[in-house]
Amino acid sequence: MSFKERVFEKARQNVRTIVLPEGDERRTILAAQQLAAEGIARPVLIGDPSSIADAAGKAGASLTGVGIVDPADSPKREEYAGVLYELRKAKGMSEEEAGRLIADPMYFGVMMVRQGDGDGLVSGAVHTTGDMLRPALKIIKTRPGIKVVSSSLLMDFQDKEIGHDGLMVFSDCVVIPCPSDEELAHIAISAADTARTLCGIEDPKVALLSFSTKGSAEHELVSKVRSAVRIARSLDPALALDGELQLDAAIVPEVAALKAGGSPVAGKANVLIFPDLQSGNIGYKIAQRMGHAQAYAVLQGLARPCNDLSRGCSVGDIVMTAALTALQAAGSIKQP
Ligand SMILES: CC(C)(COP(=O)(O)OP(=O)(O)OC[C@H]1O[C@@H](n2cnc3c(N)ncnc32)[C@H](O)[C@@H]1OP(=O)(O)O)[C@@H](O)C(=O)NCCC(=O)NCCS
């Protein structure tokens, strides 16, 4: 069974409600149809019901089993606006502004997830990462013990000798441009959690990457990675985590034996932590385009899952992201 099929199968065993705020967008509607028809999730489209019905008609999609919620006409609108105001008043939000913002499908959808009326959210066929992430950061916030929201790329290689049966987790490749040592440590802890929850890697081996291996070079950028390793170890002493490691020392046993003998991670890493967003984003695209890996992006560190799509996404991408979101939801916590 492929990684994708395994994800769908797991999602079917524990069906979750997935909120889709871009409710009248063609690919989103087709994905909702597939999610409902194949029992992968309970999709809820946010938007004006007549616009959604029009778009579904044009796409030839059936809305059987697909929920529709209209923020303009929802009995929850007042409650949600009140919660938004309470959460943001200390930051200067007025009641009027909260009332106006909650009419926006993105804010409404994120609030549905916060309030437990949805288990997770997927958007990005139309909106940017920031459009979704800003409301999510303000309304849902981070998981207890985790300071930053970041991302992981689940890399599915054809060569099953790579990583854990062909799977590796690369992080952070989407969110934090220039993480501090502490942020890098939190990214590492989150990525290990993502490896367990979404890839079934029960014993993740986490390498914090650099251009130096165990003191082979000295630079402030290397010191930052070393410091991140110390912080991450104090956050989770039981986690197999090591650094600083060059990529080859992290994944090639012969190089690891020469450069990092005795490391619990070197030569067998299956979770790679990049030192910044430039290296992370470039790194995953090299693996995707030259190493022919399938790459699936998820956000991590939010108290309840919200995930982003690329604007060029296919219907299949939306379905897979919704399924991954459902698996994250199974491991997430309820808001107080
Ligand atoms: C994530 C992102 C949207 C945050 O933008 P920002 O301008 O820093 O957001 P704001 O300053 O308005 O912050 C909003 C709130 O979120 C918090 N926040 C910002 N980034 C955060 C993060 N990564 N984790 C946790 N909280 C975060 C801020 O502290 C702030 O909290 P507060 O309002 O309660 O004080 C921005 O970093 C971003 O766009 N990243 C994506 C980078 C990118 O372009 N990637 C594309 C690669 S494919």
Image (cartoon, rainbow, N blue to C red):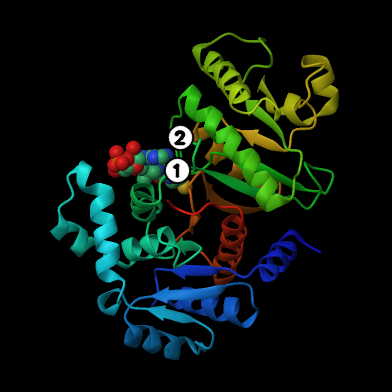
Q: In the rendered structure, are the residues bearing label 2 and label 1 in contact, judged by CB atoms less than 8 Å apart? A: yes
Ligand 1 within 8 Å, label 2 CB: yes
Indicate whether 88 appears above or below 83. above
Ligand 1 within 8 Å, label 1 CB: yes
Q: Is residue 32 visible?
A: yes
Mark on residue 147?
2
Q: Residue at x 33, y 88 (%)?
A: 50
Point out residue 126 in the picture as x, y percentages from the top left corner: 39, 65
Indicate whether 14 appears above or below 61. above
Q: Which residue is mark 1?
A: 142
Indicate whether 321 appears above or below 236. below
**Of callouts 2 and 1, which one flags the residue occurring earlier in the amino acid sequence?**
1
Between 260 and 66, the one lying in front of the other is 66
Q: Around disc 2, counting alpha carbons within 10 Å, would you say few (fewer than 14), some (14 to 19), or many (20 or more)? A: some
Q: Residue at x 85, y 24 (%)?
A: 254
Say left or right for 9 vs 124: right
Quarter location, residue 74: bottom left
**SS of the residue under disc 1:** loop
Query: The N terminus lies in which quarter of the figure?
Result: bottom right
**SS of the residue under disc 2:** loop
Point out residue 215 in the picture as x, y percentages from the top left corner: 66, 9
Say left or right for 48 vs 310: left
Q: Around disc 1, counting alpha carbons within 10 Å, would you say few (fewer than 14), some (14 to 19), or many (20 or more)? A: some
